[in-house]
Image: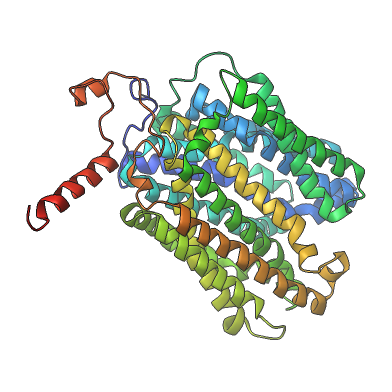
Amino acid sequence: MEAGAGAAGRAPGLGYATAAGRWVLLATVLGSGLAQLDATVVNVALPAIGRELDARVSDLQLVLTGYSVTLAALILLAGSLGDRLGRRRVFVVGVVWFVAASLLCALAWTVEVLVGARMLQGIGGALLTPGSLAIIEASFRPADRSKAIGAWAALGGIAAAIGPLLGGYLIEAVSWRAIFLINLPLGAVVVWTAAHHVPESRDPTATGRLDVAGAALVTLGLAGTTYALVELPARGLGFLPAAASGILGVAALAGFLVLERRTPNPMLPLTVFASRQFAAANLVCLAIYAGLGGVFFLLVVFLQTSLGYSPLQAGAATLPVTFVMLALSTRAGALAQRIGPRVPLTVGPLVVAAGMILMAFIEPGETYVAAVLPAVTVFGLGLAATVAPVTSTALAAVDDRHSGVASGVNNAVSRAAGLLAVALLPPLAGLSGEDFENGAALAEGFRTAMFIAAGLVALGALVAWTMIRSDVLEDDDGGLDEAVPDESHHRNCAVGGAPLRPGRRRRAVREVRRVVRRPGR
């Protein structure tokens, strides 16, 4: 089932409430959920892994960072490959690769083998993560895309939330190896569903040789900066490998941008940034996810160190966020589709900021119901109102044929923002390594960090109010007025120019009606 040969990669037009639409959601949500699950579940398994494999602390850090670095390094390249080779094809390859690497993780006989397998897992995660979102953008009709993205965000969030709980159970009941083996049956379901029910789509204008030099530079750049952001907070600026890696990464990214401007077949067409809406949506994403990264990093530690929660209790304390996301994200996406994303992307982040401020006033000794529950509930309400609209806006702001690249950029921005939060927020809040074991010091630093995070998210709301258009989701082919070189224009229009897109037709009709109804006409 091929989409896009005659219409510049546009969607086949699946409906959200149809059986075909549900199959696509199942494949994409379950596929991206695999990557999200393994990003959180391994944290719980580290002590057991260390005991069985006789691993040092530095080895266990590599078990985490190896996955993060390869995933972040290749995520933009993977999005571009999906546009060029087929989004379903790259997605399925990513799932198969991820599952094979998971099996190797489960069979690892030394910590070195486990680190290598985790790096291979990150490659699979990079291939499938942007593909899952690009498939939704390319498969659903414009009117249903925001709802589908809302469901993707809500259901995907469940995987991240249940990771620590599921991991703890499997480690105690079976073995740490079981957290990797569970990916095998889940991956098989994703591959079967994708092969039978997910339509293929690609960018039919992607011709010429693959931009190998660009791919190498962006991979090196993202890998270097990610490694630096992961390692420098723990080891300090004096850790030369991470510092040199960061400098090399920034230089490679700068070289990548110069190269992409000059090459005839760029991996990342810089014209996508000509869309003011795409740039604005990613600025909003950067600000919001930087604030969110601070909460996700510090809240669970604060609950354990300052409030005396057990790891299981701390993980369960944030479940209301997941429940609110599950209940409201799809509705938030539908609302943004109906009234436009500007208001949701202004109000939602402000509600998130309100939740963060409530977190800042949680005091040691207060009960969960009186202090923690209201804060995480308000936080969850704002998050549910924000995630689907910001993702929908970023993807809708470019032509459908670039949905893979747009998804890769959006994923890279959100991950970079989270890493920046982990790297910079603790020192800005006055937190050092010893403070994470001191309840009183952590409580004071946590309060400062939440105020900073709230300011970042509020900044995202300001950017949204001043830069995001309310009608961006009406345009079925994005914010760029690019002519589509196919003969469909001649079927719609008596001249050779492109016809009005649906969103612009609606605005034109409203304008005509306004003029006709004007007094004196």
Q: In terms of image quadrants, where is residue 210? A: top right
Count of numbered labels shown in the rendering? 0
Residue placed furthest toward the top: 208
Q: Which percent across, then down, holds residue 245?
A: 83, 39
Q: Which percent across, then down, holds residue 271?
A: 51, 31
Give the colour scheme of this rendering.
Answer: rainbow
Q: Is residue 38 visible?
A: no
Q: Residue at x 37, y 59 (%)?
A: 331
Q: Is residue 510 visible?
A: yes
Q: Does 237 sit left or right of 268 as displayed?
A: right
Q: Which percent across, then down, holds residue 177?
A: 73, 46
Identify which residue, 14 or 340, lies in the foreground.
340
Q: Which percent across, then down, holds residue 230?
A: 78, 49
Q: Does 318 sit left or right of 420 as displayed?
A: left
Q: Is residue 100 above or below residue 318?
A: above
Q: Residue at x 51, y 61 (%)?
A: 461
Residue placed furthest toward the front: 520
Q: Residue at x 60, y 19 (%)?
A: 263
Q: Residue at x 71, y 43 (%)?
A: 68
Residue placed furthest toward the left: 520
Identify which residue, 500 or 329, lies in the foreground.
500
Q: Is residue 355 above or below residue 193?
A: below
Q: In which quadrant is the N terminus drawn?
A: top left
Q: Is residue 251 above or below residue 17?
A: above
Q: Does 107 sit left or right of 145 as displayed?
A: right
Q: In terms of image quadrants, where is residue 431? A: bottom right
